[in-house]
Image (spheres, rainbow, N blue to C red):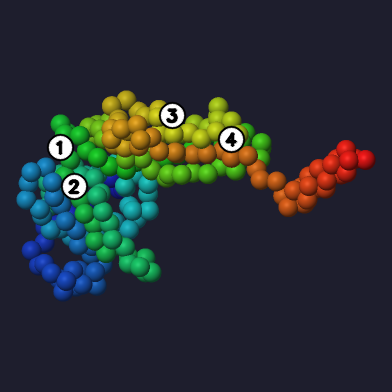
Amino acid sequence: MSDILNLDAEVRTDLGKGASRRLRHANKVPAILYGAGQEPVSLTLAHNKVFRAQEEEAFYSQVLTLNVDGKAVEVIVKDMQRHPFKPLVMHVDFLRVDAKQEIHTNIPVHFVNEEALNKAGAVITHHVNEIEVSCLPKHLPEFIEVDLADVEVGQTLHLTDVALPKGVTSVELAKGESHDIAIVSANAPKASASEDTESADDAAGEEEATEE
């Protein structure tokens, strides 16, 4: 995990599309570092290190350490551009982190204890895969767990039903009750076509018996 959360970077002064193209040919990734009231800095990182890191969930949700020319800078990933079909990272935006200032970022959701609902035949629908939160860097969770152990068939969990970690608040709920979005639903299984036909036949039979 340390290799994922710690990356070496170099300041670059050769800017522009041509420079970025040359960097990519040299297996480097162009990047930008900004925020915390400081000037933006253009960077370059080794592509193999970034590509390996971006395969891990923590890369997007945790505070990373960039070693910029030997100086450690705490950051989070704000944006990343990938090649449309090649396994290449084209560009990364890093946001500086201030330990005393709250940050807004998206945290992945992990759904647990779905087994009972699956056995009951429920059709489980995940409406979101991540939740936007606000918190100090020290409270930033790696993921948010949504427990379905007590959920019943036909029930939908909303954002207000999710227990967020200490020090973490929902950006959506801060906007008002109308933003209490659905997180996951456990819907009753739909009857098959044959079952629907049998039910219709039974109903028709009962109606004919009544008329007689």
Residue 124 is situated, as x and y percent measured from the top left of the image, at 56, 42
First in sequence, mark 2 or 3: give its number: 2
Q: CA distance from mark 1 to mark 3?
A: 30 Å
The residue under the point 40% across, 38% down is 181
Q: Nearer the viewer, mark 2 or mark 4?
A: 4
Residue 92 is situated, as x and y percent measured from the top left of the image, at 24, 57
Q: Nearer the viewer, mark 1 or mark 4?
A: 4
Residue type indicated by callout 3: Asp
Taking 69 as reference, is 125 above or below it? Answer: above
The residue under the point 16% across, 34% down is 101
First in sequence, mark 2 or 4: give its number: 2
Residue type indicated by callout 4: Gly
Q: State the quadrant of the C terminus.
A: top right
Residue at numbered disc 4:
154
Residue 209 is situated, as x and y percent measured from the top left of the image, at 90, 40
Q: Label for residue 95?
A: 2
Q: Nearer the viewer, mark 1 or mark 3?
A: 3
- The reply to whether callout 1 and callout 4 are in contact (CB within 8 Å) is no
- The image quarter containing residue 120 is top right
Residue at numbered disc 1:
98
Q: CA distance from mark 2 to mark 3?
A: 30 Å
Q: Nearer the viewer, mark 2 or mark 3?
A: 3
First in sequence, mark 1 or 3: give its number: 1
Residue at numbered disc 3:
161
SS of the residue under disc 2:
strand
